[in-house]
Image (cartoon, coloured by chain):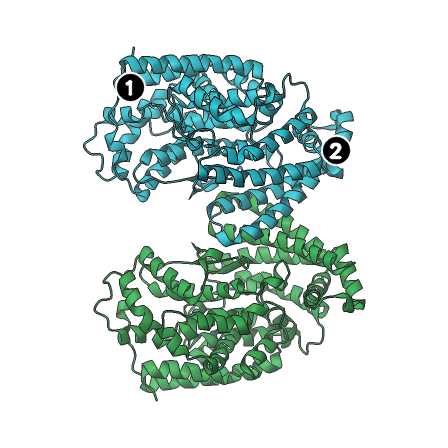
Chain colours: A green, B cyan
Amino acid sequence: MNEKEFLNEVKEISLLNQSLALLEWDSQTGMPEASSDFRGDVVGHLTKLSFEKSVGSKIKESVDYFTEHSEELSELGAQVFEKVKEEYEQNCSIDPKRMQEYKATLSTAHTSWLKARKANDFSIMKGSLEEIIAFLKEFIPLWKKNEKTDYDVLLNLYEPEMTVEKLDLLFEQVKNGIMAIRKEIQEKGQVPRTDFLTRKVSKEQQRKFVLGIATDLGYDFKKGRLDDTVHPFMLPINRKDARITTCWDEDNFKIATFGVIHEAGHGIYEQNIDPKYDYTPLAAGTSMGIHESQSLFNEIIIGGNREFWKKQFPFFKECTEGTFDDIEFETFYASLKETKASLIRIHADNLTYPLHIIIRYEIEKMIFNDGVSVEELPAIWNQKYEDYLGIRPEGDLDGVLQDVHWSGGSFGYFPSYALGYMYAAQLREAMAKDLDIEKVLSSEDYTPIRAWLTKNIHQYGASRKPARLIKDATGEDLNPEYLIQYLRKMYSDVYGIA
Amino acid sequence: MNEKEFLNEVKEISLLNQSLALLEWDSQTGMPEASSDFRGDVVGHLTKLSFEKSVGSKIKESVDYFTEHSEELSELGAQVFEKVKEEYEQNCSIDPKRMQEYKATLSTAHTSWLKARKANDFSIMKGSLEEIIAFLKEFIPLWKKNEKTDYDVLLNLYEPEMTVEKLDLLFEQVKNGIMAIRKEIQEKGQVPRTDFLTRKVSKEQQRKFVLGIATDLGYDFKKGRLDDTVHPFMLPINRKDARITTCWDEDNFKIATFGVIHEAGHGIYEQNIDPKYDYTPLAAGTSMGIHESQSLFNEIIIGGNREFWKKQFPFFKECTEGTFDDIEFETFYASLKETKASLIRIHADNLTYPLHIIIRYEIEKMIFNDGVSVEELPAIWNQKYEDYLGIRPEGDLDGVLQDVHWSGGSFGYFPSYALGYMYAAQLREAMAKDLDIEKVLSSEDYTPIRAWLTKNIHQYGASRKPARLIKDATGEDLNPEYLIQYLRKMYSDVYGIA
């Protein structure tokens, strides 16, 4: 075994995964509906080929050999090896037969979830969810390294090195901070005018605007494309092909506008990973939380900035061809900052969004660390919405049934969204020491912002863990105060609270 | 070895090929331009995996075993085995290293062709073309079974069982027949009015019209889709996913209209292959000629029919929103039949098109059977255009440099286009015995036509050779008289010749 042979095997896995990524993109955007059975077979086979290679003899041999002879690896080889070994151990930890049974359960659960939503009745998916949780409780000891609690293990599937101990403190601060801001707004805030936000903006007008904005922000359309989907996403095939999607609502231009700004952030991350990581698992975002930090940097830091909108407003007016001619800039800007408790996470504004995540985090932790039963979830859910957001779901559809994540087995994923908020605000703080962000956003050229993020985050791909990236980029560990300060500033400005 | 094991191996090859088909579709329609190097690597790897399996130990073992024990195969198994064995022998006939060198030569030749076109100078690609021809002359003895001449071997790569002996006779009749019709038209034909054909029809108007027509003809959009490309094509991923593309010219609606009608014919063929052939190489058209017969049945038989256009004209007027309100139906119909000698094959009308093909056939035969040198090609080409079409290219760009086929090594492919014309006309004659075609085309429901073609052609996929399909469907061997009669009727009608 030598490094070249090892990297070649890793490359062949990457080539299979790139074709799987295209198949996935196509399934979500344009595949003729009737062909889903054929597509399932194709994806199943390539997934099997890729998985078999990832735990196959060559990788096993490499893991054994280079664990003993790490000195034979170049710096790059060692970085790749660390990641490959990590994935190898993960992939080997579960009996493939059990994993297959688990996947079959997930597939059934997805159908149950759809049925439960149709009937607005959580009890229909209770059984499936119990099975999924049982599987995960079986897998957790096999995945466990040195994590303190069971839920830590799930957390680390999405955010390496994050712990319940840390998150409890972080989320407590965020929750208190946001609730305090909300209280002040409720008591003395001046509610912005928003009636004009529902004026009709055609898909073509919206498209022209968001293509312009995404390009300005640094999303490279020669290395990506924008398509239509029901559920927007960014899907990276490789660093020169990181595709984004959106959905359009002609009566609510904010959806596609902020949707594309968000997905473009994910895409920009992938497009700017160091080419030396091509064809390796390091050519990817390092965690869900860091990925969200990049999309949310675009969405809340840049997309929440007055100078950015001042610069883009004439272009928005041009694209919308007179529809907003009677609207002053300050009125327009304030309307984008409307905050209002919502029962549905994906409709939440920037201020209330983290509360939705914290609710899910607390419930997931109760399931895995405190033995709370599935049956109790709707009541717990509804009570938490009442406590944190002051509103209570009338049925399960507006409550515990709203997200696809749990029926997909993705426990531990939700915290990434709120981590992304915190990382983004902390990165802004650090960036402001090097750059006059307002000045850049008033200019014709946003490159300095993109370049700062590439230098501090993008280029490393998955070669550095989140905590190190944040520490190196900002000079300190994750600190939720920056998010609270940022949200306070953003909303006090518009709502006129001190 | 048993049949199940054999069919499973065949299925795995099909699954790889389906993913390759999607990669190809994406490369031609929407892949971000910058990512072509990554895409090349992905396609190269999957192509290698598919090829290695097709000549791998399991297929070899199957070929050896079932050649001796054919009685152990089911009827379906035996059909699949025959095709797999044929492909296995073909794939094993060339040393992989030489094949790779050949493919590298093709890649260089494509670049030379582009350069030669840019400079309007055939001599620039002379060397590349000589190399390709030398490779093919090396491969021909390895591919040869019982073919009489070298060029027969190339012909059979695209049209199994076709021979130079047959084609010489067929093409002689077609050439004489068309030249006679052209002479009559020149002498006493009334040239139709065509000035309004260049009126602007927006892409959206054209799109609405062709989507409607393609659906009427039986192309199932639940099993396909229509995209934009520079060079239109139909690409089958599987029978439930046969995609078509077109290009749009707002000043010439005929291009997309007849283009989509044509590609839809290819798509309908693939969509209606018997499901029992799924995941085998029989789930495909049986030859290039038969495939063209289906696209050309749509384009020249249906798309040339007065009743069809009488029925569709109101819809055309509706889609074009008043642009053609002053045009009477007969004037419109006649305009579609304009015939005029063109130097460029892809711009040719239905009457002159076969002459373009015959010229290429005669030249290819001269190269492989009579030792004509590459240097002589431009002069031969130009002289034949003068002799058959009465026009002479001024430069190589309008002559020998116009097609991509030769620089792609596709000698033997061109005759398929003219075979498709002949097959289509003969199928029409046979169909007319079972159906009142005019009556069907005046009705709301074209299903009987599609169903006749499915019963006689589509369903068999690649399980029957072209000659048998045509004989079974029409009761006789290929007979070019039907094409000549059809063209005479179609043009005499419009040009007012007896």
Q: Nearer the viewer, residue A496 or A383?
A: A496
In the rendered view, does B148 fall on the left or right side of A353?
right
Can the viewer see residue A346? Answer: yes
Quadrant of res A159: bottom right
Which of the two discs, 2 and 1, labels the residue nearer the N terminus? 2
Q: Nearer the viewer, residue B415 or B446?
A: B415
Q: How far apart are labels 2 and 1 at the CA level? A: 58 Å
Q: Residue at x 59, y 74 (%)?
A: A466
In the rendered view, does B309 fall on the left or right side of A67?
left
Question: Label 1 belongs to which residue?
Answer: B494
Observer-side mark, 2 or 1, equals 1
Residue type, mark 2 in image: Ser
SS category of the residue bearing label 1:
helix
Q: Residue at x 45, y 83 (%)?
A: A484
Q: Nearer the viewer, residue A273 or A144?
A: A273
Residue type, mark 1 in image: Val
Question: Label 2 belongs to which residue?
Answer: B62
| Residue contact at pointers 2 and 1, CB within 8 angstroms | no
Residues beneath discs 2 and 1 located on the same chain: yes
